[in-house]
Amino acid sequence: MSTLPQRTLGSTGPTVSALGLGLMGMSDLYGPADEAESTATIHAALDAGVTLLDTGDFYGMGHNELLLRDALKGRSRDDAVISVKFGVLRGPDGSWNGVDTRPVAIRNSLAYTLRRLGTDHVDIYRPARLDPTVPVEETVGALADLVKEGWVRHIGLSEVGAETLRRAHAVHPISDLQIEYSLISRGIEADILPTARELGIGITAYGVLSRGLISGHWAPGQGERDFRGHLPRFTGENLERNLGLVEALRSVAEAKGATVAQVAIAWVLSRGEDVVPLVGARRRERLGESLGAVDLRLSQNELAAVEAAVPADAAAGTRYDAMQMSMLDSEK
């Protein structure tokens, strides 16, 4: 097994690889995935020294956890730091039916997750979204009980704002906040990131390639038949403008002898030792490209060139549609 540089998630969280692997696309939302290739990609990640594996119990309605269980067979449980999101309610038709983080629901969700993963503990357990009907103190208190009982090692949060982060952390230490952070999604820099740093909470950054939009590999028609076809950044004039930003970034990447994706990931890595990017590679080829970003060092001049190519707030369109944006505590 190779090793990657390590980073610690906050002052109380686990030490993980500087780059994590997000598994969602192997089961859901991005169109059909090849299960054998997905498994091979997880194996390649582990062999390269990736330790942080991120899943959710609602990704493919349990399929993603079962996929991860099978991929980890024959390996030491200690090879992986498993992060699981819970709380999202879905229907048999794949519909999205809100969030439930009542204490009794949390215990139920965890019971099923442990069985599907074939493990006796989850390393980081986090509600995927804030439940508007349950005070965050109640949710974190229930999670704290699971930590005391040994079923959960660390408590994380996802897509919450600075005030909620403070309230949650006052109940029990929060290891990390999982939130979208990329060259074209920099909203956390104003209040959320400074608050996390003040409290000693790490950041696991998802969407670092903005669901493939700033990967440098976007092709006409891509994403039209999956959930990206409903996102404002991927439609009409917004898409054209955003792909223009990618081409500006490509010029910087080519001057560096790197790919667009590698520079975009390296930029997130440069934000601080408390930030761990998650990449959503579904194939070994894309994983290998992403791993190349870990050793890519951007000088101050190169970072300035990157940010000149893709200025803050330059992206056209919001990251989700209006309904989904209204569910984000981080955007309020």
Image (cartoon, rainbow, N blue to C red):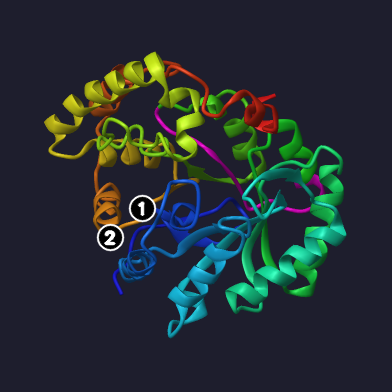
- How many numbered dots are placed on residues in this image? 2
CA–CA distance in space, label 1 to label 2: 7 Å
Q: Position of residue 105 (x, y in %)?
A: 82, 59
Expressed as whole percent of the image width and height from the top left, the position of residue 171 reads: 82, 50
Task: Say which quadrant the C terminus sits in.
Answer: top right
Along the line of sight, the residue nearer the viewer: 63 or 76: 63
Quadrant for residue 217, please give it: top left
Q: Is residue 184 above or below residue 263?
A: above
Amino acid type at circle 2 is Arg
Q: Which residues are magenta?
A: 169-183
Q: Tell me if mark 2 has few (under 14), some (14-19) or many (20+) residues whose alpha carbon lies within 10 angstroms of its own.
A: some
Instruction: Tell me if label 1 and label 2 are in contact, CB under 8 Å.
Output: yes
* Image quadrant in which you'd find residue 58: bottom right
Residue of label 1: 281
Q: Secondary structure at mark 2?
A: helix
Residue 306: x %, y % from top left: 28, 25
Residue drawn at x 34%, y 41% as measured from the top left: 265
Question: Helix or strand or loop: what does disc 1 sit on?
Answer: loop
Judged from this view, the residue extending furthest toward the bottom is 74
- The circle drawn on residue 284 is 2
255 within the magenta span: no
